[in-house]
């Protein structure tokens, strides 16, 4: 059965984010050869529980910090 898809991570510095998630969680990233900076994320092996997703360069302001 295919893994369900899709979550998306928006990052100011995609290269740094890829390195972070690869080293922390062992995720695999594949650069998409389309018209925008986008990476497909594989979070585990086929046939195991989980969800795969994508990483994209942030195109706006980062989320606001919550008020204390």
Image (tube, rainbow, N blue to C red):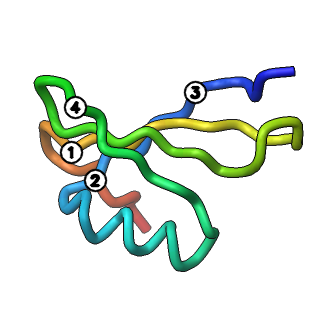
Q: Position of residue 28 (x, y in %)?
A: 53, 56
Spatial separation of the CA atoms under disc 2 and disc 4: 18 Å
How many neighbours does mark 2 have within 10 angstroms: few (below 14), some (14-19), or many (20 or more)?
some
Q: Nearer the viewer, mark 2 or mark 4?
A: 4
Query: Label 4: which residue?
Result: 33
9 or 34, which lies in front?
34
Q: For numbered disc 1, what is the local secondary structure? A: strand
Tag 2–tag 4 contact (CB < 8 Å)? no
Q: Measuring 20% from the left and 44% from the top, which residue is drawn there?
A: 58
Within the image, what quadrant is residue 39 found in?
top left
Which quarter of the image is occupied by the N terminus?
A: top right
Q: Quick one: label 1, few (<14), some, or many (20+) residues within 10 Å? A: some
Residue 57, label in figure: 1
Report the side of 10 relative to 61 (left or right).
right
How far apart in space, not on screen, are marks 1 and 3 (Cα)? 16 Å
Give the labeled residue for mark 2.
11
Instruction: Decide which of 3, 65 is in the foreground and name it.
Output: 3
Q: Work out whether mark 4 precedes mark 3 in sequence or the reverse, and give the earlier one.
A: 3
How many marks overall?
4
């Amino acid at each position: 059965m295919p893994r369900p898809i899709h979550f998306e991570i928006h990052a100011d510095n995609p290269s740094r984010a890829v390195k972070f998630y690869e080293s922390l969680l062992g995720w695999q990233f594949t650069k998409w050869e389309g018209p925008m900076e986008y990476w497909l994320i594989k979070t585990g092996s086929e046939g195991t529980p989980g969800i795969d997703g994508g990483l994209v360069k942030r195109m706006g302001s980062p989320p606001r910090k919550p008020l204390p």
